[in-house]
Amino acid sequence: MSDVVAIKDQVEAAVRAALSEVLPAELAGADPVVRRSDRADFQANGTLAVARKAGRAPRDIGADVAVRLHGFAAEVSGPGFLNVTVPDAAVWSAVAARLADPRLGLAAPHDGERVVVDYSAPNVAKEMHVGHLRSSVIGDALVRVLGHLGARVTRQNHIGDWGTQFGMLIQYLEEHPEVSWKGQGAETMSALDSLYKAARAAFEADPAFADRSRARVVALQSGDDATLTVWRDLVAESEKAFETVYRRLGVLLDGGDFDGESRYNDALPGVVADLLASGVATESDGAVVTFTDGVTGPDGDPVPLIVRKKDGGFGYAATDLATIRLRVEHYRADRILYVVDARQSLHFRMVFDTARRAGWLPAAVDAEHVPFGTVLGTDGRPFKTRSGRTVRLADLLDDAEAAVRTVLAGRSHGFTDAELDAVVRAAAIAAIKYADLSTTRTRDYVFDVEQMVATTGDTGVYLQYAHARVRSILRRAGATAVGHVDTTLPLHEAEKALALTLDGFEATLRDVAGTLEPHRLCGYLYDLATAFTRFYDACPVLGADDPAVRTNRLALCDLTGRTLATGLDLLGIPAPERM
Ligand code: ARG
């Protein structure tokens, strides 16, 4: 592994060094504000702000910096910013260095940081809905990016596996031994979902059944063996079904990541007792609650976070407070992410505030709610089936696969049936995940299969095509295609634009890790594919006359292909060799 210092970082360091030579000591650390630019390779705008502070004309400072800049050519422009040009040899050297490293020269800026990511979190005996899909897809991309930058990531799937609803489920099963729900493979979740609906209907229609269900809740909570056995079965079968979905979708979550609400049962009385003892929580009307400064309802009254209900039962909030204690004490997290839909923002704000005041969340530990918007149907309303049911994830994948098949049927691809199936599966995953990830996280988006599987435009399938096209060029060039990069060759303008885009990969990943916004990586990969197309249109690769030119261009192809494949992988999207 050898880290390559990105060209942009080199430029930044050089401008910073030159600035510190011309500025008074107290201004020397100033940010040079380096950006890519249309008019030069990079533009440094930092001279403007700093000149004002130093009481000098910006153009003067710019000129002073330009003559002291090492390694790069610079010119003062406009009111006094710098246009910086990178020498061709430096660009080729960076390409060669990245290609020589299996990690493409990426540094690991999050090395050793411990991050816990809470995501997916569907509910036992209920069909996963599109909200869980978003959490799974976004959470997984964050897990991959943070891990790739060196963080030690713990995945936690906080499934809803506890609560009063199990009373009615178990009671219903007890009274209806004819209901079959177990061992139905992919259909288990639907069978459980129907069971849930039947039990709910009985609970609402029949007060006697409701009473027996409540007694069943007590039996469950007090550890009655027969009741616990059925509960365990329900949880285990649901977990199996969730894992089937994760595998099909290419989500990393597996059996070792389940962190159900039930795991925290024993910790809940302690949560309440400690909060009361420290005075963070108060008793109000029989319930135990906390308040957060500034959180008030429409009437102006403070909104309580209910930690223990009036009837003595513990709320969702108590469990989440317990998750924080475990994640800090046991997992030693430096950063805890909760990838949960935006409607739970207030919940997390209050939970984090309570945990801080209770001393469970030290100042050095970050806790972040990573909210996301709602998935809408093409009618602009929350996505439901025509009959108003939640849409099953398996059906979404089936729909996407069918749409991809139609698109591919119109192309001559020469695949065997088995190859075609594999490509269809990969493209369907790309279609669904990319549509989700490429939207600004907090915004709602429309689930539109036709648009998602398009092979042109900003889609995951388009990026897979771009990658496969690069791989096909390399295949046609032959096995020894990529050789020694000649750093003395002059760069074509389109080669330079591509190489400088490739150079921005690491900055993009850092940005995603900081903002927790995967759409920035999507945008980057789309720009990269576009820069590659421009390069390929302008610069013959296989047809280049000069063998050294051909080799250098193949190096650019290779680095583009590997960057696209790595980037897609970090989004959880496969990159087939052929499409
Ligand atoms: N099971 C919950 C739901 O379906 C999501 C749980 C999110 N995670 C958490 N730690 N609260 O809405």
Image (spheres, rainbow, N blue to C red):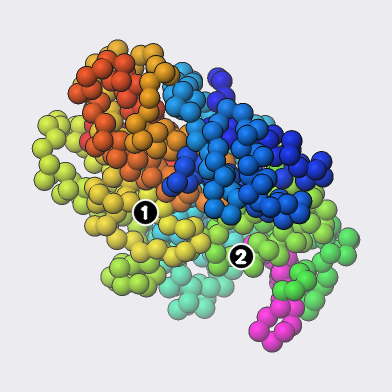
Residue identified by numbered label 1: 435
Mark 1 element type: helix
Q: Nearer the viewer, residue 43 or 353?
A: 43
Q: Is residue 215 left or right of residue 208?
A: right
**On the picture, is 163 further left or further right than 494?**
right
Task: Give the quadrant of the C terminus.
Answer: top left
Q: Could you tell whether 56 is left or right of 545 in the image?
A: right
Name the one closer to the observer, 550 or 159. 550
Identify which residue, 321 or 114, lies in the foreground.
114
Residue at horizontal 51 percent and vertical 62 percent from the top: 442
Residue at the (55%, 19%) spot, across then down: 1
Query: Which contiguous range is marked in magenta?
Result: 296-316
Question: Which of marks 2 and 1 precedes in the sequence?
Answer: 2
Q: Which residue has dot 2 on it? A: 345
Within the image, what quadrant is residue 537 found in?
A: top left
User: Do callouts 1 and 2 mark residues in contact (Cβ within 8 Å)?
Assistant: no
Asked whether residue 416 is drawn in magenta, I would say: no
Name above or below for residue 351 compared with residue 119. Answer: below
- Residue type at tag 1: Ala
Q: CA distance from mark 1 to mark 2?
A: 23 Å
In the image, what residue type sits under mark 2? Ser
